[in-house]
Image (cartoon, helix red, strand yellow):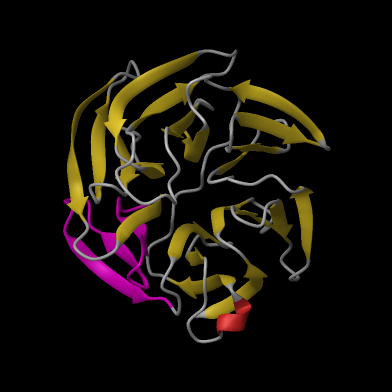
Amino acid sequence: METLASGYGLIEGPREDRNGHLYFSDVTKGGVYRRAPDGGVETVVPKRRGVGGIALHRDGGVVISGKNICHVKDGETRIVFAVDAVPGFNDLYTDTAGCVYVGSLRSDPFAEGEQTPGELYRLSPGGGSEELYGDVGLTNGIGFSPAGDLLYHSDSAIPAVTVVDVGADGKVSGKRIFAPIERGIPDGLAVDEAGGVWVAIYGDSAALRFAPDGSLAQRIDVPAVSVTSLCLGGADMRDLIIVTADNTEAPEREGTIFRTRVDVPGLRAPLAAV
């Protein structure tokens, strides 16, 4: 388990571009950052807190969550989507058409007590938006199967990873449990070429891989309790990049970015076009 960077608060939204630059956010201390292959880190979006998801945009820049969904390029911010009754949005992902799928947060995810369920929205190129379904207890990681016909969604309140069927017309149906989480809660997720679903497990020091049938196939122990998200990257897409909000081997390092190797290559996230 290699350490790539540390000293952050709660790291989220890891996403690697084709040149090996790793984008990530710090939810609590603020900011969106980019780590170069040589280890240098620069600020992409200063100060913004609550960014739980990042997508790279076809025209350059990043699409990020927070109090709204916005596209930031060359220091300029364009608001893509906002809902007056929704105080924030968390993780997000893209499909091959450039649509962005994002979950809403209707209550503070760090507050104790029952959460107010949110929704999953699809944002389309040209400015369209659609609520795909509701009753998401606490939205987290989102991803698609290799064929794009299944959409996976971590619901930390259940806690489980859910899945829906995605039709050729884009309509979703058949929401059901894909993988219940017995210890800890599911956070960010990533899908590999074989249809395996990697899930960051917050509170159980692990990244779990579930086979396409939902059975547990692999566990990787992580030297952190609060494992928040992950992505697959590297030249061969076999680098598993895991981000956290702590570091149990070296507590002074706080939120840490780790990297390890896996057998099955991951799916590269499509670029956003919203």
Q: Position of residue 39 (x, y in %)?
A: 74, 70
Q: Is residue 32 above or below residue 264?
A: above
In the depicted view, which residue is nearer to us: 22 or 200? 200
In the depicted view, which residue is nearer to us: 20 or 228? 228
In the depicted view, which residue is nearer to us: 261 or 179? 179
Q: Position of residue 254 (x, y in %)?
A: 59, 74
Quadrant in which residue 71 is drawn: top right
Q: Position of residue 230 (x, y in %)?
A: 47, 59
Q: Is residue 220 above or below residue 67?
A: below
| 29 with respect to 221 (left or right) | right
| 145 with respect to 249 (left or right) | left
| 260 with respect to 180 (left or right) | right
Q: Position of residue 117 (x, y in %)?
A: 32, 33
Residue under the point 30% across and 26% down = 134
Residue under the point 38% across and 69% down = 263
Q: Is residue 168 magenta?
A: no
| 51 with respect to 139 (left or right) | right
- What are the residue bounds of the magenta stretch? 193-222
Residue under the point 70% across and 51% down = 31
Q: Is residue 214 visible?
A: yes
